Structure formats: structure tokens, C-alpha cells
Amino acid sequence: QVQLAESGGGVVQTGGSLRLSCAASGFSVSNYGMHWVRQAPGKGLEWVALIRHDGNDAFYADSVKGRFTISRDNSKNTLYLQMSSLRAEDTAVYYCVKVHDYVWGILGYWGQGILVTVSS
Amino acid sequence: DIVLTQTPLSSPVTLGQPASISCKSSQSLAHSDGNTYLSWLHQRPGQPPRLLIYKISNRFSGVPDRFSGSGAGTDFTLYISRVEAEDVGVYYCMQATQFPYTFGQGTKLDIK
């Protein structure tokens, strides 16, 4: 069955960088679009980024465009989110999400999430 | 960006009774491919969200049939026919018709 395991979170200083990983099992990340969605403490959900199934394009929220990069390593079956120039407002739990039925807009399978804290 | 407005923001319900949540969009969610990418998700405390309904009215795998969705254009509704204790938590609508994908602010469902 589909399993997604995020890692790489932690505490980072304002302006710093961090790379999140999402190890996938039960399917190949090369075949599906994948998303990152985040949730600030006590707040609602915010879509962050999508990478196409073919990896040829990616889409970002304006709040992270130019600072975050979504990518994947098919050989490791892993999704990544490289985050730089981090701000306090990037503090959140970050979820890795697999689409359902090859449709980008159906966020079917969610990881448990990983907490990123940006502190000055 | 498309703004999704959910009502109510909080809903105390009695076990066994029905419940509904409304989600109104700032613009039509009809996509040029003929689909409407409006989903509903449920998040229990301390848990990740899980998909309940996609494309307005399609139940995701394993979702009980007491959950249903309806709507079109800019107005959508999630229905729970008979609320059970495990249904507590926060419900979100989400649109994926246009980038950036956006979520409603969430509706907290709890038991009276």
C-alpha cells in the first residue's frame, strides 16, 4: 500500500536552508504527480508545490516561489523540498502528498508530516 | 487566487444526527477539461488530513457512504448523514481547478 515518510525537519535560523525528504513505498514517484502542503501551528492548510509525474515542470505558491524547489530522485523513490531563505512564516508541518488516479488535483495520499521551525 | 469560504466555522452536532458544511468559491471551479476539482478533506487532532470526497461527489477509497458531496460552479456542500464519534475534527474544502490550489479556512465539527 501507499506509504509516505517525511524526514529532514527541525529547527533552522531565519535565512537558513533545509531539505525535506519524502520516502515513498508502494508505488513509483516517477509515475505520479506529487505535492507538498504545509500547515502552520494551529492554522489551516496551505498548498506549497507540485511536481509533474514526468518531472518536467513544477508549480509553486507565490509565498515560496524563488525560495523553495521541489524535486525527486526516481532511483531512490524519494521526493524532496529544498527550502532556502527561510522565514518565520515558513514554520509549519510539511506534508508530502501523492495524487490519486494520476490526477494532479486529487490529493489522495498524505504522509504523517514533518515539523519545520524557523527561529531567529 | 481563488478564495474558498466555509460555513459554519464551528458545528456542534448530536451523535446520529445529520450535518452539513458549505463551501463557496470566489469564482467558478469548472475546469476547461469538463471536471470540477473540488475536494473535501478531514483532519482529526494530531493526524494528517485525509481525502474524503473529490470532484464534488466522488468518495475516496474506504470513505463511509454516510459522507456525500454535492454542488456546482461556486457552491458546494459536504453532508454527513448520521454523525459518528470518529467524525470529529476539522473539515476543509479544497480547489484544484486553478493554481495556486487553495483551501477553505476549515470547519470544526464536535459533539454536543
Image (spheres, rainbow, N blue to C red):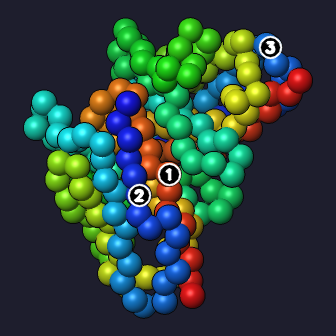
In the depicted view, which residue is nearer to us: B102 or A115? B102
Q: What amino acid type should be assigned to the residue bearing mark 3? A: Gly
Residue A75 vertical placement versus B112 (above, below): above
Image quarter (top left, top right, bottom left or bottom right) of the C terminus of chain A: top right
Instruction: Tell which subunit mark 2 falls on.
Output: B
| Residue A106 in sight | no
Identify the residue position indicated by label 1 in the image. B105
Q: Quadrant of residue B63?
A: bottom left
**Mark 2–mark 1 CB contact (< 8 Å):** yes
Residue A83 vs B41, above or below: the answer is: above
In the structure shown, which secondary structural element does the residue marked by tag 2 occupy? strand
Chain under disc 3: A
Q: CA gap, disc 3 to disc 2?
A: 36 Å
Dots 1 and 3 on the same chain: no
Q: Which residue is identified by label 3?
A: A16
Residue sitting nearer the eye, A108 or B42:
B42
Q: CA distance from mark 2 to mark 1?
A: 7 Å
Mark 1 closeness class: few <14, some 14–19, many ≥20 residues within 10 Å? many
Question: Which is more foreground, mark 1 or mark 3?
Answer: 1
Q: Is residue A120 left or right of residue B76?
A: right
* Residue type for callout 1: Gln
